Image: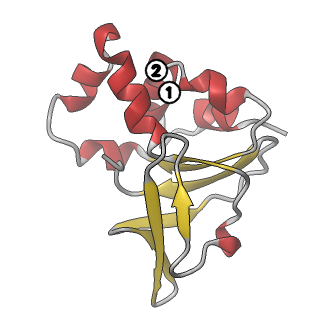
Amino acid sequence: MSNITQVINVDKTMRTLKKTVHASDIDQLLSSTGPYTFFAPNDLAFEKLEKGIVDQLLEPQNRTKLADLLNNHIVSGKILFSELKDGQKLTTINGKELLVTEKDGNIQIGSIKILPRDAKISNGAMHLSDTVMV
């Protein structure tokens, strides 16, 4: 069974996430025992950011900013998609609060749509987000 970093490394829709996870050293955290829940932005999510932002964040001097951005997507503990409930409040590992909403069977965090990702993960759970949480 793979850990979160290993799943990101082989997923063809998460090439940008793979670069950012390794450039920020978050791969170390996401490879540890956890457990963690990761709301993983796919390549389309990164494309929604202002042009040039990702390249800027990948520069070595911006490692801390990049790590902080990615920490907005990580919650301690394993939360399966079926356990995400309307009105639920989650706290990211950097202390930000995420509000889960459910509308017409769709799960969102704020205005960001969350999709299930049914990979078997050894150190937690991972769900897809269509937008980067800034």
Secondary-structure class at tag 2: loop
Secondary-structure class at tag 1: helix
61 in relation to 105, above or below: above
* Few, some or many residues within 10 Å of mark 1 (<14, 14–19, 20+): many
Mark 1, residue position: 21
Whole-percent x and y of residue 57? 29, 23
Query: Which residue sits furthest bottom?
Result: 104
Residue drawn at the location 64% of the way across and 28% of the way down: 29
Hey, what amino acid is under mark 2?
Answer: Ser
Residue drawn at the location 61% of the way across and 72% of the way down: 84
Residue drawn at the location 48% of the way across and 65% of the way down: 114
Direction from residue 3 to residue 53 in the image, left or right: left
Mark 2, residue position: 24
Direction from residue 94 to residue 68 in the image, left or right: left
Residue drawn at the location 20% of the way across and 30% of the way down: 53
Hey, what amino acid is under mark 1?
Answer: Val
